[in-house]
Image: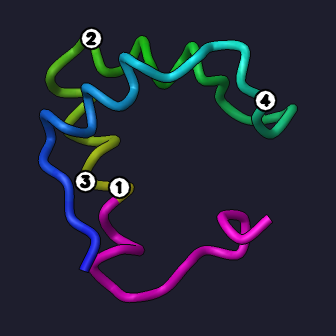
């Protein structure tokens, strides 16, 4: 089972390099990093990221 704490999630995004490519029409890494500076936004993002992990499935966009 893959499980990370909220603090580990925030630490991961703080270390993420902003020049890493992502979907052109989606949120950028910079936006995700900025979200981790606010406790409420970070917790919501962390919880949303856990839904697929807890449910045992992988969203199609994660497979690309």
First-in-chain label (1 vs 2): 2
Q: At x 41% / y 19%, what residue is drawn?
A: 15
State the CA–CA distance, disc 1 to disc 3: 4 Å
Q: Residues within 10 Å of mark 1 (few under 14, many from 20)?
A: few
Name the quadrant containing residue 17: top right
Q: Secondary structure at mark 3?
A: helix
Q: Which residue does the numbered mark 1 point to in the structure image?
A: 48
Magenta stretch secondary structure, dominant: helix
Frontmost of labels 4 and 3 is 4
Give the left or right position of residue 47, taking residue 24 as reference: left
Name the quadrant containing residue 63: bottom right
First-in-chain label (3 vs 2): 2
Q: Which residue does the numbered mark 3 point to in the structure image?
A: 47
Q: Secondary structure at mark 2?
A: loop
State the CA–CA distance, disc 4 to disc 3: 23 Å
Give the left or right position of residue 54, taking residue 32 as reference: left
Q: Is residue 15 above or below residue 49?
A: above
Q: At x 63% / y 13%, what residue is drawn?
A: 18
Q: Classify the position of the N terminus by image quarter.
A: bottom left
Q: Is residue 51 magenta?
A: yes
Residues at marks 1 and 3 touching, judged by CB atoms closer than 8 Å: yes
Q: Which residue does the numbered mark 2 point to in the structure image?
A: 37
Q: Is residue 1 above or below residue 13?
A: below
């Amino acid at each position: 089972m893959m499980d990370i704490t909220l603090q580990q999630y925030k630490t991961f995004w703080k270390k993420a390099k902003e020049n890493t490519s992502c979907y052109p029409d989606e949120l950028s890494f910079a936006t995700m990093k900025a979200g981790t500076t606010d406790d409420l936004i970070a917790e919501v993002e962390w919880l949303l990221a856990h839904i697929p992990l807890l449910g045992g499935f992988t969203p199609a966009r994660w497979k690309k």
